Image (tube, grey):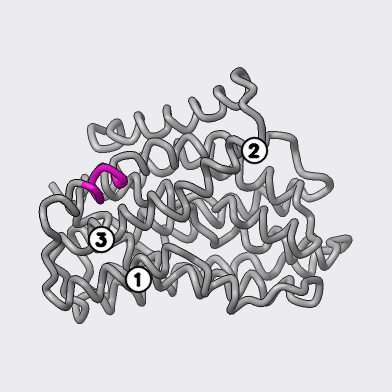
Amino acid sequence: MTTALLLLPDFVLILLGTALRRWMHLGDHFWSGLEKLVYFILFPALLVNAIVRTRLDLAAAAPLLFTALVALAGGMLLGYPLRFLRGMPPLTFASIFQCGYRFNSYIGLAVAGLLFGDAGIATMGLIVGVAVPFANLTSVWMLARHSDSGVWREIARNPLIWATLAGLLLNLAGFVPPRPLQIFLGRLADASIALGLLAVGAALRLRGPNGVRLPALWLLGVKLCAVPTIAALVGLACGLDGVYLAVVVLFAALPTASSAYILAMRMGGDGASVAWLISASTLGSMLTLPLWAAWLAGRAV
């Protein structure tokens, strides 16, 4: 229970972001600019700072990354049967399908850092760096015939992937940042968590989906319960323990990323249903993430 309570401040920040958007009337331009700042500057600095400072064993990380990808694939397989529901428009299915496996990196990095420090952030960064291309490829492929945007261009522009690669290369090269650079990256990293979680809260939309309530509830169960269960079972079977097991299970339990809505809108999909699913999974994770954290803490005792 103590471990679960540690997550409370992060969820309060998310709810604060919702309240600030509703009551301060800062405008869409402000929140869009804040999300770009976090996405392109602050979170990449957080990743580089954590990965450079953490001793990594990439050979030992292979089962970790395998577990993460199997968990994502499990979410895809469990969500795919919705395609055959009577009355399910193909474009609606392609839009909401991604909500069963895509993940919110902002919350993931915040939780990993809170519970495990730099080692947690570095581990989550490795997973994100590998999982983002896999998730993006699948999501864009499902919506591909409705879009003119290229999947490889979207992946090539992802700053979290580039930050992870840069941190890994610097780490493997034995680079030790000089003190002023450490302070600079640390300041950016400190700002990233609070501002990132505020941006998550500001993006919540609570208007219900149109005509896809049961499929939406199914996908919520897949994302918040089934996918982390798969990660736990596969991780244990692969011999993971400690930080690696905890972080991969928490990664699998993350709510859907707001980028799923952006992709659906950009490719002409059902943005309203996706926005509701993102919001519902974020609010639902306020219950399920602490439960998974408590279970992992119980295993460590």
**C-alpha distance separating marks 1 and 2:** 43 Å
187 falls in the magenta region:
yes
Q: Nearer the viewer, residue 159 or 142?
A: 159
* Nearer the camera: disc 3 or disc 1: 3
Check disc 2 and report the residue beneath it: 29
Magenta stretch, main secondary structure class: helix
Q: Can you tell which mark lies on residue 46?
A: none
Q: Residue furthest front?
A: 180
* Nearer the camera: disc 2 or disc 3: 2
Disc 3 packing (10 Å; few <14; some 14–19; many ≥20): many
Between discs 3 and 1, the one toward the N terminus: 3
197 on left or right of 276? left
* Nearer the camera: disc 1 or disc 2: 2
Q: Amino acid at mark 1?
A: Val
Residue drawn at 36 percent across, 53 percent down: 250
| 240, above or below 218, in the image | below
Disc 1 packing (10 Å; few <14; some 14–19; many ≥20): many
**C-alpha distance separating marks 3 and 1:** 21 Å
Residue drawn at 54 percent across, 62 percent down: 101
Q: Nearer the viewer, residue 192 or 297?
A: 192
The part of the chain drawn in magenta is: 184-189
Check disc 1 and report the residue beneath it: 234
Q: Amino acid at mark 3?
A: Ala
**C-alpha distance separating marks 2 and 3:** 32 Å
Check disc 3 and report the residue beneath it: 122
Where does residue 257 sit, x and y in percent of width and height? 55, 53
Q: Amino acid at mark 2?
A: His
45 falls in the magenta region:
no
